[in-house]
Amino acid sequence: MADFFQLLSGWLPMLIDGAVTTASLSILAIVAGFFIGVVIYLMESGHSGFGRGFARVYISLFRGTPVLAQVLLCFYLPGELGLSLPGYLAAVMALTFNTAAYQSQILRSGFKAIAPGQLEAAAMCGLSSRQTLWHIQIPQVLRLTMPSLISELIDVIKASAVVSVIAITDLMRVGQQLASATYRPLEVYVAIALSYLVLTSLLALLGSYVERRWHQESR
């Protein structure tokens, strides 16, 4: 055990760098995915047949295919179209498109929980649909769905491990490099697993803190 902690202290700078990359990828994806998720929800619940059809196909596509395949497509497809896309951006895009499909369904419950009377009152006060969405609906939806959104962020962090296949130096890639350099795969991947656990636990605690603050402010 002492030997493991000695190894861990030596690996710590690389693990921290990998954790920062993993966290930045995941947070960018969850934020961008939130806004795309709102659009997908609005299309799915709208009056346009094309919009509803597009939203359903989008949700089925990104929920029904592996994240790994989506990452590889976002990395290689632009090259086939003559575009040069950095690996980091391809990884963010893939994770964003994936989480947007899941978030659209999470957000559905939040939108449905808002009393219709609030929307009618907003219309009577002269607010446009866009103003009602961003000033009345979105703040309430965030509060109502915060626990589910934090769970989704944790899922994105775990799913982000697949971006190592396109040479992104995230936590999993760091683990692969350390295992190859040290020939200590068991210890390395225990350290990687603990790093993911620490990262997800910190984000869960942060989400709980924000949720408690919101409840206190709403009293």
Image (cartoon, rainbow, N blue to C red):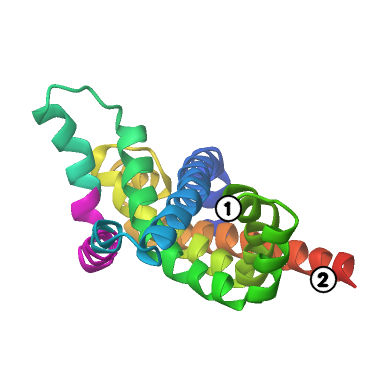
Q: Which residues are magenta?
A: 55-70
Query: How far across and how far down the image is residue 176, in percent?
Result: 31, 47
* Callout 2 amino acid: His
Residue 184 seen in the figure: no
State left or right for residue 10 relative to residue 186.
Answer: right
CA gap between label 1 and label 2 equals: 27 Å
The residue nearer to you, when weighing 52 against 121, is: 121
What residue lies at 14% left-to-right and 36% top-to-bottom? Answer: 77
Query: How far across and how far down the image is residue 68, in percent?
Result: 23, 55
- The kind of secondary structure the magenta stretch mainly shows is helix
Residue 101 seen in the figure: yes
The residue under label 1 is 129
Query: How far across and how far down the image is residue 52, in percent?
Result: 29, 63
Residue 117, above or below 195: below
| Quadrant assignment for the C terminus | bottom right
Does 193 lie within the magenta span?
Answer: no
The residue under label 2 is 215
What residue lies at 64% left-to-right and 55% top-to-bottom? Answer: 132
Query: How far across and how far down the image is residue 179, in percent?
Result: 32, 49
Most distant residue in the left direction: 80
Residue 36, above or below 83: below
The secondary structure type at the circle numbered 2 is helix
